[in-house]
Amino acid sequence: MDTSALIDQILVFAFTFTANLFASVSGGGAGFVQFPLLILMGLPFATALGTHKVAVVFLGIGALAKKKSNNYAIDKAVALAMLFIGCPAVVAGTLIVINVPTHAAELTVGFVTIAMGFYTLFKRGFGAQGLEHRSKLRFTVGCLLIVLVGMFSGSLSSGAGLFATMTLTLVFGLELKRAILHTMIFVATIWNAVGAFTVGAVTAIYWAWIPVMIVASFTGAYVGTSLLMKLPVGKVRVIFSLVAILSGCLLIYTAEH
C-alpha cells in the first residue's frame, strides 16, 4: 500500500469512527459526517451512498453488541411497521436517487441537515418521557411518516436516523433512548442493509475502504452506546445538533465547489 492510500485509510477510519460514535449517542447522524466526507474524498454521489450504507450496517451491530439492558424492549407494533412498511420504502428511495442529479441531491441533503440540526438544538425536553397509550390515529400517522423516512433513508441517506428517532419519539411516543435503540436496529442495521443491497445492484460500491469502515463503524458505535447510557439527553442533543449543522454546511460547500 502506497503512502497516499495509507493516508486515505487513516482518514476514512477517523471520520467513520467519529461519525458512528455521534450517531450511536444521539440516534442518528452518521451520514452527516461520513457521507459528505466520502464525497469530499472523491467518490461520486451514488458510489458514496452505497459505500456509506454498507459500513453503517455495522453501526447498528456495534450498538447492539454493547446494549445489555432490558429497559428498552422492542415495541412490536413499531417493529412490524419498520420492517413491512419501511423496507419497501427504502428500496423505492434508493432506486429514485440513482436518477437524481448529484448537485440537487447534495444541496437537498445539506439544507435538510442544517434544518434538523437547528430543530434539535432548540427542542428542549425532547424524548424525556414515553407515551403510555398510543391512539390508532397516532399509529397511522406514524406509519405514513415511516414511509417518508424510509424513502429518505434510501435516497439521501444523511439524516434518516435522526428523522426516524424523531418520528419514534414525537409520534409513536417512545422514550428517547428506547427510540434510539429502535433506530439502531431497524434504520442503521436493517434499512441500510436493504439500501446497500439495492444500491450495489445498480451502481458501484468502493470496496477498498469497506474493511476499515466496518471496523471503525463497529468500534465507534460500541463506544458511543456506552456514552449514551451515561450522558444526559441535553448534552447529547447539543453535541449532535452542532455536528448536524456543521456537516450540512460542509455538504453544501462540496456541492457548490
Image (cartoon, helix red, strand yellow):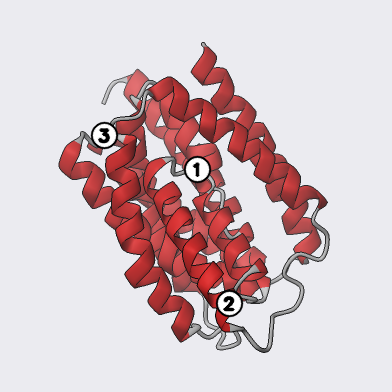
Note whether residue 210 is visible: no
Note whether residue 194 is visible: yes
Q: Secondary structure at mark 1?
A: loop
Q: Is residue 252 left or right of residue 4?
A: right
Please, is residue 144 above or below residue 23 in the view? below
What residue type is disc 2 on? Leu
Q: Measured from the top left, where is residue 3 in percent x and y?
A: 35, 20
**Mark 1 vs mark 2: which is more N-terminal?**
2
Q: Residue at x 34, y 36 (%)?
A: 97
Residue annotated with mark 1: 158
What residue type is disc 1 on? Ser
Q: Residue at x 51, y 47 (%)?
A: 30
Q: Secondary structure at mark 2?
A: helix
**Mark 3 vs mark 1: which is more N-terminal?**
1
Query: Which quarter of the rendering shows the N terminus?
Result: top left
Q: Measured from the top left, where is residue 209 in percent x and y?
A: 31, 37
Mark 2: give few (<14), some (14-19) or many (20+) Cα within 10 Å. few
Q: Measured from the top left, where is residue 81 in percent x and y?
A: 41, 73
**Farthest-out residue, left:** 201
What residue type is disc 3 on? Tyr
Please, is residue 84 above or below residue 254 in the view? below
Residue annotated with mark 2: 137
Mark 1: give few (<14), some (14-19) or many (20+) Cα within 10 Å. many
Please, is residue 10 above or below residue 213 in the view? above
Residue annotated with mark 3: 206
Q: Secondary structure at mark 3?
A: loop
